[in-house]
Image: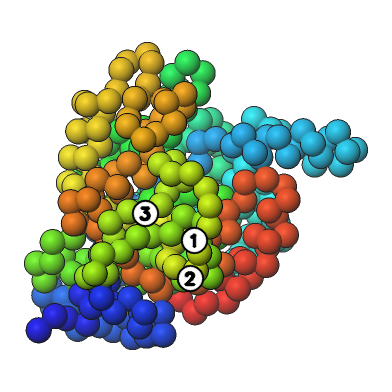
Amino acid sequence: MESMLARLTGANHAKAFAGRDAVLAAACTENSRGIRTREEYRAWLRERTVIVTMLAGAGTRWVRSLKEAVARGEDTGFDPRKPRGLFPVRNLLGRGPNRIPIAAYSLDAGMELGDRLVIVRGYEEEIRSSVLDPLGYDPGSVRFATQEVVNGKPLGHGDAARQTENRWSAYEYVVVNFGGDASNPRTMFDTLAVFDALVSSGEPVAMMMPAALFDAPAYPIELDTRGRPTAFGHAKLHGGGAASGPGYANVGVRMYRAAALLAVVERIASAWYEPGVGYSIPENDPAGREFALDNVDAELAASGLARILPIALPEELTPVKSLEDLPRFGAAIEKVRADPH
């Protein structure tokens, strides 16, 4: 008989959110490792997981919004060369100063779940002093890696993963989140525990993506009759346009078995990367020359090795991409951080 977790990450997705309070307990019951408590699972995962936080760029829309604010006489004083994750917002974390960089929320999520690799293009000392130190990070648990550029621009988070593969490939699990998102510690931990429990029971799964249900997601996840994703509707691969009705979408967190991620990253780089030029991946914007993790996700979905777990709050998908997004982010993070974890 199919396990509860296999059903919730398959045909019974619709019951996942209503049953989210029981998901971690099910992971403790169904894993074959003898893990039976939250504390045991956290300790098990901590030794085998690296959380990769992407904090390498400002973003085109963000820089444009800063320039527009200056033109309106509303200069924020924020250096547009810095990653937008360093912009200060209200601190709801219960420690540190009254205002803290946006990225503190992403870097706090998963803080006790594994080692941390932060992908940057400079500003390491400011990230450490304004985010990591106030959060109470052990300096030895955080490493920085600089994403090198080609022709003056970074070539996507898939390329960042390729450049840093020697920093994450020795782990069992790689969790990726982004410095401008409203990451939820509960969603991250519960989903990773479910992922590991399925792996331990022999389920053929190499990727797990927490998801939320939306009335009309801009980039909906397409599912087959078994409830397994066939396409993720990522912006890097497809045009815009909301779904015609309710559907699932990712909330800015991806989880991989490191060996599977490495294999796909190396295959894509071998097939489509030209040094000094960039990538020519089919279906991607040919002018951008980028490699996105979206491409990895698409390949794993096509191979039947991806799953989703829709236990996330919709507010977790509230990225800051311009100054205009800040009020919405503030409201979202207030709800996300009220979620017990």
Give the camera-side residue of 50 and 219: 219
The quadrant where residue 125 appears: top right
The amino acid type found where label 1 is placed reads: Ala
Label placed on residue 232 = 3
- 245 on left or right of 190: right
Secondary structure beneath label 2: loop
The dot on residue 243 is 1
Amino acid type for the residue under numbered disc 3: Phe
Q: Secondary structure at mark 1?
A: loop
Label 3 to label 2, Cα distance in Å?
Answer: 15 Å
Left or right of residue 142, residue 339 in this image: right
- Please tell me in which quadrant of the rendered image residue 274 appears: top left
| Residue visible at 30% across and 64% down in the picture | 223
Q: Alpha-carbon neighbours of circle 2 within 10 Å: few (<14), some, or many (≥20)?
A: few
Residue 41 appears anywhere in the view: no
Q: List the residue tagged with mark 2.
A: 246
Where in the figure is residue 338, as x and y percent of width and height? 57, 76
Q: Quadrant of the C terminus?
A: bottom left
In the rendering, at what x and y percent does residue 58 appear? 60, 36
Residue 253 seen: yes
Mark 1 or mark 3, which has the lower sequence index?
Answer: 3
